[in-house]
Amino acid sequence: MRRRLTLLVAATTCLVLIAFLVPLALLVRQVAEDRAMSRANGVLQTIVPLIGTDAAQLTLAVEGQPLPVTVFAPTGEVIGQQATATPAVALAAARLESFAVATATGREIVVPVKSTRGTYVVRTVVPAAELDRGVTRSWLALAGLGLALVVLGLVVADRLARTLVAPIADLSAVSHRLARAELSARAAPAGPPEVREVALALNHLAGRIQDLLREEREQVADLSHRLRTPLTALRLEAESLRDPAEAERVAAAADEIARAVTTVIQQARRRGGERQACDATAVVADRVAFWTVLAEDTDREVRRELPPGPVPVAIQADELAAALDALLGNVFAHTPDGTAFGVALAPRRGGGAVLIVDDDGPGFPPGALRRGSSGSGSTGLGLDIARRAAEASGGALRVEAGPRGGARVRLELTGVNALPTG
């Protein structure tokens, strides 16, 4: 925009200068020509009164002029600059009219003078250099003036464009920061009134977004908190069971749900933009151990491939656990009992890890990849939870066909330089 405004001012300035300087340049040349012709006519007028007088005095007057002057006498005698009679001289003598004609060397002026002895013709030639004297210098001065005006116009246009572009660039930077979830970014109202109005509107929008997100987080936290009451009742019911093993199993499940609810509350109230790390090996091993117990109850074979050492990834432990739980929950929800599944974790070259969950079931039903869509009456949010967790860490989620014909989900996670301490 800044460049376009500068080019627009430059083009406008050039057009205005051309409209004024070209006619002025032509006028300068015409003035120079008229000045030279006027000087020549003045020379001839000093000689005309001497026609018919003393020949010596006439000769002296002709030879003392700044221009070459020739007087053609009716007797054929030539006084002054020696020259042959041109057609213009003969025409002036015949018509008794003064005129000027253009020649190859300049401008020829002839003046007939009638006397008692006959018709004399006074002739002079104004050289082309005299006709154009000072024109080149004047044109150069006009060109320099025009160039100076163009440069001045460009400087002024650049300053004006900067005052317009700088606030707009600031608005663009603030909008990009808001897009990166930096909701505290604000634009400084500056520039023209219209740009200031846009800045104020953008700041108002950012504040409104913060308010809406805060309300949404609080509503999610409140909704999650309401689940604590039925969970407490469920735990009390579990403790009243007669079978100690069954009571312990149900109580453990209730505790697991309570921890999940606590995690949801913490995530809902957590500010955006935080990027933490965890050991993917430890998190995956813990969740696979939890789901292995359920797999044994449903006669499912569990295939696991975990690296021997820690694999740091740029995602929080609870988010990675929730993503893996969502994927494994889909396996249990959408495949019949006895269907085997596998969990594999491998470090990536350059940092990060690849988490793969596959099963031997029928694969994904049509439309299951859309958020909120499910072929078995569930919420349809499992894959979306895993996808958002991967993208929050800078990775991605890919759905493929498994080697045994079932569903296969590939979760790519970015790495970090080191695990957070403490």
Image (cartoon, rainbow, N blue to C red):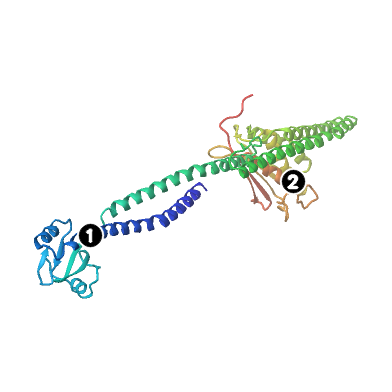
Residue at image location 35% in from the left, 58% down from the top:
27
Determine which of the numbered discs, if any, sits on residue 381 in the image: 2
Total number of numbered discs in the rendering: 2
* Above or below 303: residue 143: below
Amino acid of disc 2 = Leu
How far apart marks 1 and 2 lie (CA) works out to 102 Å
Q: Position of residue 386 (x, y in %)?
A: 69, 43
Q: Is residue 25 visible?
A: yes
The answer to which of 319 and 34 lies nearer the viewer is 34
SS for tag 2?
loop
**Residue tagged 1:** 40
Q: Residues within 10 Å of mark 2 (few under 14, many from 20)?
A: some
Residue appearing at x 60%, y 32% in the figure? 310
Residue depicted at 12% across the width and 61% down the height? 58
- Dot in front, 1 or 2: 1
Q: Horizontally, is 342 left or right of 130 in the view?
A: right
**Residue 273 occupies which quadrant of the picture?**
top right
- Horizontally, residue 193 falls left or right of residue 68, namely right
Could you tell me which secondary element the residue under label 1 belongs to?
helix
Q: Earlier in the sequence, mark 1 or mark 2?
A: 1
Q: From the viewer's perspective, tell me whether residue 13 is left or right of residue 294.
A: left
- Name the foreground residue: 28 vs 183: 28
Nearer to me, 175 or 419: 175
